[in-house]
Amino acid sequence: MSGSMADAEIAEDRAFDAHVFACLLAVAAIEEGSPGDHLGLGYGDLTALIERWFPHARSALSAWCRREASQDDDEVAMVRDLLLAHRSTPGDDSRWLAAMIARRAMEPNHLWEDLGLRDRSELSRLLARHFAPLAARNTKNMRWKRFFYRTLCEADDFVMCSTPVCSSCTDFELCFGDESGVSRLAQRRRELALTVAAA
């Protein structure tokens, strides 16, 4: 994507999907190590994604993609399988997204931040578009990572909550609190601009 991320034209679904994939690639690029490790994709899937969405960048990214990803741990696999079971769009895009969302869900920040998105509404749109049956079940607007884990626990007949009703829970803010903040990519651009200005 060219230009400012804040100015991205994403009204159309295809443009939005391109924006999401660009954000994921960008956030993986600013982290140490293999992009496949950060995205949960092997070399074949990562190169296929780039060929499909960013063919003009194929030569620039080919060496970057060559480092093979490690095997997913059980936790990543469970979240990925949950997403795959609730796909609402066919094909590789939703399969790649399931793997990438599951892997990025292991990071410590809000999920939208660790996906490189601008805000939570983009994550909600992404999930409603590609994983609609699952997204529709989050009727109380629970934080997405918490919602995934709660869904997995309920599928195993395990109750992870101390109270049966969320409104009376002492941990309400952990599940439903504010998710505002500055996107990781905007923060990185600011850091680079400050470094250049100081030089």
Image: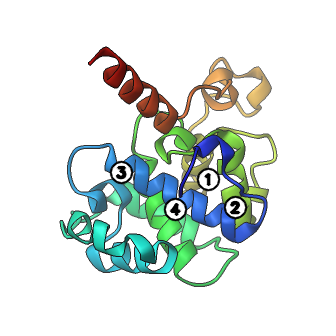
N-term mark: 2 or 3: 3
Q: Amino acid at mark 1?
A: Thr
Q: Is disc 2 in contact with disc 3, using a CB cutoff of under 8 Å?
A: no
Q: Residues within 10 Å of mark 2 (few under 14, many from 20)?
A: many
For label 2, the residue is 134
Q: Nearer the viewer, mark 2 or mark 3?
A: 3
* Mark seen at residue 28: 3
The residues bearing labels 3 and 4 have C-alpha atoms spaced at a distance of 11 Å
Task: Name which quarter of the figure residue 14 lies in.
Answer: bottom right
Q: Residue at x 67, y 61 (%)?
A: 16
Left or right, residue 42 beside residue 10: left
Give coordinates of residue 172: x percent, y percent.
Answer: 68, 23
Task: Name which quarter of the figure residue 134 lies in.
Answer: bottom right
N-term mark: 3 or 1: 3
Q: Is disc 4 in contact with disc 1, using a CB cutoff of under 8 Å?
A: no
For label 1, the residue is 151
Q: Residue at x 70, y 22 (%)?
A: 169
Q: Residue at x 67, y 78 (%)?
A: 89
> What is the secondary structure assignment of the residue under circle 2?
helix
The residues bearing labels 4 and 2 have C-alpha atoms spaced at a distance of 20 Å
Q: Is disc 4 in contact with disc 2, using a CB cutoff of under 8 Å?
A: no
Q: Amino acid at mark 4?
A: Phe
Give coordinates of residue 107: x percent, y percent.
Answer: 40, 41
For label 4, the residue is 21
Image position of 154 with respect to 187: above or below:
below
Q: Residue furthest bottom?
A: 91
Left or right, residue 20 beside residue 178: left
N-term mark: 3 or 4: 4
Give coordinates of residue 42: x percent, y percent.
Answer: 29, 72
* 42 or 80: nearer the viewer: 42
The residues bearing labels 2 and 1 have C-alpha atoms spaced at a distance of 9 Å
